[in-house]
Amino acid sequence: MIYLTQLIYINEGQEAVFNQFEDVAIPTILKYKGRLVLRIRPTGDTFVESNIERPYEVHLVEFESEDDFRDFLNDEDRKRFLHLKEQSIRAVVLIKGTQL
């Protein structure tokens, strides 16, 4: 099992476009033995560190294998909507890990 944590920073005013991409990407995870474990939108009062930029969303996703994650990234239906991702997301920090 691999775990992916994403800190997602979106372009101002692109929330609706980001949500359109998520409507495609999140269900696609299931096709590749994956699962969205957490999807969090931090707010000012829940964000402990004030000296770093707050992400729009934080995702924790799991896949059974690296190959399953790679297959998800290469999914043709998902690829057709990447323009929405590119339009709405300014930056992503991706952290890969395994359960200890």
Image (cartoon, rainbow, N blue to C red):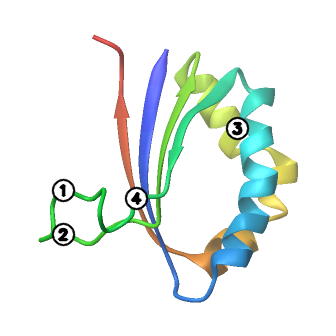
User: How far apart in space, not on screen, are marks 3 and 4 (Cα)?
Assistant: 26 Å
Q: Residue at x 71, y 35 (%)?
A: 29
User: How far apart in space, not on screen, are marks 4 and 1 (Cα)?
Assistant: 10 Å
User: How far apart in space, not on screen, are marks 2 and 4 (Cα)?
Assistant: 13 Å
User: Which quadrant of the view contains residue 81?
Assistant: bottom right
Tell me which label, 3 or 2, sits earlier in the chain: 2
Q: Residue at x 18, y 69 (%)?
A: 52
Where is residue 89? Give x, y as percent: 55, 73
Circles 2 and 4, Cβ within 8 Å, touching? The answer is no
Residue under circle 3? 72
Q: Amino acid at mark 3?
A: Phe
- Single out the residue that lies furthest toward the top: 100
Residue under circle 1? 48
Q: Amino acid at mark 1?
A: Val
Asked if residue 52 lies left or right of residue 8, the reply is left
Q: Residue at x 79, y 44 (%)?
A: 75
* Mark 2 burial class by Cα count in 10 Å: few <14, some 14-19, many 20+: few
Tell me which label, 4 or 1, sits earlier in the chain: 4
Tell me which label, 1 or 3, sits earlier in the chain: 1
* Mark 4 burial class by Cα count in 10 Å: few <14, some 14-19, many 20+: some
Q: State which mark lies toward you, 2 or 4.
A: 4
> Which quadrant would the C terminus be assigned to in this image?
top left
Q: Amino acid at mark 4?
A: Pro
Q: Secondary structure at mark 1?
A: loop
Where is residue 90? Give x, y as percent: 48, 77
Q: Residue at x 66, y 26 (%)?
A: 34
Tell me which label, 3 or 4, sits earlier in the chain: 4
Q: Nearer the viewer, residue 76 or 35?
A: 35
User: Which quadrant of the view contains residue 35?
Assistant: top right
Circles 3 and 2, Cβ within 8 Å, touching? The answer is no
Residue under circle 4? 42
